[in-house]
Image: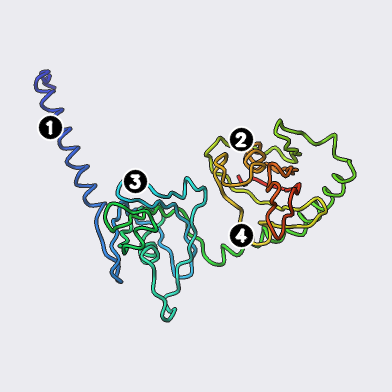
Amino acid sequence: MKKISFKSQSIFMRLMLFAALFALCCFSCQKEKKLTTPDGHEYIQHTDLGKEKPKPGDYVYFHAQIRDGERILRSSRQDGVAPVMQIPLTDEPGRELSPVESVIKLIGLGDSVTVLIELDSMQQQQMGITSGNIMYYDVVLTDIETEEERQSRLDVVRQRESEIAGKVGATVQQYSAGQLAAEIKTTASGLKYIIHEEGSGDTPKPGNNVSVHYYGVLTDGTMFDTSFKNGEPISFPIGMGRVIQGWDEGIALLKPGGKATLFIPSLLGYGEQGSPPVIPPNAELIFYVEREK
């Protein structure tokens, strides 16, 4: 084979680089395009992977952020809660779809789009939009679940509620009788806890999103809130003040799959004011918690 000179190689490489860049630009142009839904809502499709699309009645899970141009006003990743939405049934009379609903039902799993939502002056003020009257709603579709799949998943959790209630009731009695002193550990802030199962992996760092099932009671055993009733965990970013201080500190101790009981003094809970009508002032709270894997 004839050897190519250094100069020839340089020209050849530049041509190849140009060709690659041209192909990438063409690919991007084909993939990212401005479209309009049948009911007139505009959106930009960034990726079209050709995967499964939701059907009427399906539940879709997605990450979203709201932008004012390049300025991010709200992000589900920062909030720690991924939105979920049921695709409306096509035969719902008089039901007008929102721009986001109208677009999401058209895209597939893993696809990303930006919905262009036109606002009036009052909506602009409420949303904090300052650069024009368009709100940019970015979406990445992460999961699709049928109604049957969702109910089956939630039922597995719901069926555990009575079991968890029994365990927590026993813990409250033992705690009140002073029988857990050897098991309880206490942090510098005064949070007391028992790790029932360690889980595996790493404990979360500040800003990491966690999903947690919980069963919360007062020290007299009165249940005031639980995720086991509806089957859905709570999700939030650790250390961002989105939950009471005792949770931020206590859940940060758990690895994925970890289970624990937190004994939260009022200063790390709802303090002197409590949370009427269910949590009285200066109340110590007991939470059984499970961090999802």
Q: Sequence order check: which comes first, mark 2 or mark 1?
A: 1
Q: Amino acid at mark 2?
A: Thr
Q: Which residue is mark 1?
A: 15
Q: Which is more foreground, mark 2 or mark 1?
A: 2
Q: Residue at x 77, y 52 (%)?
A: 218
Q: Residue at x 57, y 43 (%)?
A: 241
Q: Sequence order check: which comes first, mark 1 or mark 4?
A: 1
Q: Which residue is mark 3?
A: 71
- Foreground residue among 264 and 80: 264
Q: Amino acid at mark 3?
A: Arg
Q: Please say if the residues under marks 1 and 4 sit with CB atoms less than 8 Å apart.
A: no
Q: Which residue is mark 4?
A: 153
Q: Amino acid at mark 1?
A: Leu
Which secondary structure, mark 1?
A: helix
Outermost residue, bottom direction? 93
Q: Which residue is mark 2?
A: 203
Q: Please say if the residues under marks 3 and 1 sit with CB atoms less than 8 Å apart.
A: no
Q: What is the C-alpha distance between the residues marked 2 and 4?
A: 25 Å
Q: Quadrant of residue 51?
A: bottom left
Which secondary structure, mark 3?
A: strand
